[in-house]
């Protein structure tokens, strides 16, 4: 169920841009990532980050995925323990 006040991401798009020159005309060759998040409230959020920040975002996302998978397995184990306890209690009754 959606949380009150927090829109959910429904689509993600991205692209890589490379700045070839600065406004002063010097060579730059700086890559950046442009991310667009489409939200379920109809709005879009777009942001840009450099390569170093993108790696931080990627690592943080991988950590979150691992934690979500762990929490999902843990929640399933708790449900299974509860079902066994109910079945045992019902068998004793």
Image: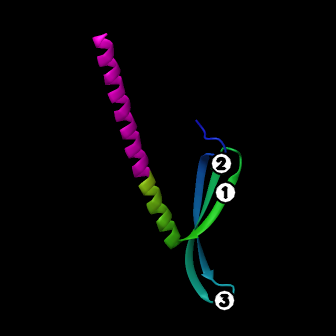
Q: Cβ–Cβ below 8 Å for labels 1 and 2?
A: yes
The answer to which image quadrant residue 14 occupies is bottom right
Mark 2 or mark 3: which comes first in sequence?
3
Q: Give the residue drawn at x 28%, y 12%.
A: 92
**Vertical placement of 39 versus 17: above or below?**
above
Q: Nearer the viewer, residue 78 or 9?
A: 78
* x then y, percent, for residue 51: 51, 72
What's the distance in space between the residues labelled 1 and 2, CA to CA? Answer: 8 Å
Q: Which mark is residue 45?
A: 1
Residue, disc 2: 39
Q: Give the residue drawn at x 56%, y 78%.
A: 30
Mark 3 or mark 1: which comes first in sequence?
3
Discs 3/1, front = 1
Residue, disc 3: 25
Instruction: Give the secondary structure at mark 1.
Output: strand
Chief secondary structure of the magenta portion? helix
* x then y, percent, for residue 42: 71, 46
Q: Give the residue drawn at x 59%, y 87%.
A: 27
Q: Give the residue drawn at x 37%, y 45%.
A: 70
């Amino acid at each position: 169920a959606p949380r009150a006040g927090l829109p959910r991401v429904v689509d993600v798009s991205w692209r890589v841009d490379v700045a070839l020159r600065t406004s002063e005309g010097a060579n730059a060759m700086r890559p950046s990532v442009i991310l667009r998040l489409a939200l379920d409230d109809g709005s879009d959020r777009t942001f840009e980050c450099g390569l170093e920040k993108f790696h931080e975002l990627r690592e943080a996302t991988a950590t979150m995925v691992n934690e979500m998978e762990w929490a999902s397995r843990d929640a399933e184990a708790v449900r299974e323990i509860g079902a066994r306890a109910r079945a045992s209690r019902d068998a004793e009754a």
